[in-house]
Amino acid sequence: MRLILTLAAAAYLLSACGKSDSAEAQRRVPPLVKLAPVQSVRFVERIDAVGTARANEQVTLTAPVTDRILRLNFDDGAYVARGQVIAVLAQGQEAAQLAQAQARAREAQQQLDRLEALKSRGFATRSAVDAQVALAGQAAGQAAEARASIGDRVVRAPFGGWVSLRNISAGAVVGAGAEIATVSDISRIKLDFSVPETLLSRVQPGQPIEGVAAAYPDQPFRGTIATIDPVLNPQSRAATVRAVLANGDRRLKPGMLLTVAVESAARTAPAVPELAVVGEGEQTFVFVIENGKAKRVKVITGLRQNGMVEIRQGIAAGQRVVTEGVVKIADGQAVRPGPAGRGAGTPAPESEARARGKGSPAGKSGG
């Protein structure tokens, strides 16, 4: 029994020593990392905002007087041309007044012609002719007033566009100022959005913009900045910028909310993947390999775009940096660059087997 216990204790000690040697050997194996060259990437500075779509031209046509609607000449959502009649209000009384005024104007003109003929023969005074001229002019003015009153009862489209849904019918009596229809020219869209005063130096007319509507999230709408409001909002300290977007297919509607991106500046700069950048407080670092050892290099970063980080200072394009495995290494530590296409931390089978074979108990006893 004493012999058995002695052998068991020896076996346990040998096993513990073997595990310790194996762990020590693994600690001595340099970690595997993946390297990639610093690339030159085009970065675009963007100003993001939210804008409201407005019609290129829009007007709400109202009844100029209180009267009954005789007829409406538009359908819901139809296109109307410039000058097209939209609605006609009752004008019977005005037509009668026009007829009376025209009759008086003809009579006054005839009387004026007779007086001028008599004056030429010396049978009429100049004052009589002048008085009749005034009466003729007054009658012509009354006729013009009657014609204008009739014209006010014919509502026309001031420009070509699409009318709103009809909410009124012929025969209804409307009051002065009552809405008849809204005409909108949406062949182009004016997109208004706010830009803080701190960013106004990066915005100017002619600059391209891109808008995305919630209704069409996969299709951006492109346009250019047309003008910048010269007066800032005193509460928000921002200026309203107006861009113009083509809208030939009429998918954009006035009142839509769009997210806006303004490309304010573009540049090509060295860049590394985001995984290659290590942050420590307010400083950032990357690892480069020199003589088989990791060297931590302080860098100044800029924009982040599509998984890449702009490097403004610290390294140049073409240098190789550690892109995977940065969490396993330290400054001055020996590392093993992995083959291209292998993820960081994936061991190379043959080299790993050799490293473990040299430090294992089986390798010692086999010698």
Image (cartoon, grey):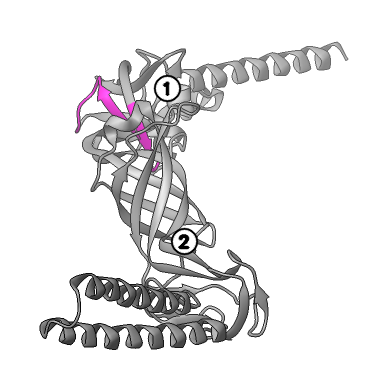
**In this rendering, would 257 be left or right of 316?**
right
Pointer 1 residue = 278
Give the residue drawn at x 31%, y 74%: 137
Q: Position of residue 219 (x, y in %)?
A: 43, 62
Residue type, numbered disc 1: Val
Q: Is residue 167 above or below residue 305?
A: below
Q: Is residue 164 shown above or below 281? A: below
Residue 256: percent from left, percent from top = 52, 57
Among the two numbered marks 1 and 2 on one chain, the one whose residue lies closer to the N terminus = 2
Residue 295 image offset from top left, x and y in percent: 31, 16
Specify few, some or many for label 2: CA neighbours under 10 Å numbering under 14, 14-19, or 20 or more. few
Inspect the magenta stretch and tell me whether residue 313 lies in it. Answer: yes
Residue sitting at x 18%, y 72% = 126
Quarter of the image where the N terminus is located: top right
The answer to which of 254 and 1 lies nearer the viewer is 254
Which label sits in the foreground, 1 or 2? 2
At mark 2, the secondary structure is: strand
One can see residue 348 in this view: no
Q: Where is residue 5 drawn, in percent x and y?
A: 82, 14
Image point (31%, 77%), residue name = 136
Q: Nearer the viewer, residue 47 or 232?
A: 232
**Secondary structure under the numbered disc 1 in the rendered image:** strand
Q: Amino acid at mark 2?
A: Asp
The answer to whether any part of residue 286 appears in the image is yes
- For disc 2, the marked residue is 218
Q: Nearer the viewer, residue 61 or 104?
A: 104
Q: Which residues are magenta?
A: 302-317
Report the front residue among 265 and 119.
119
Q: Is residue 154 left or right of residue 69?
A: left
Res. 159 image quadrant: bottom left
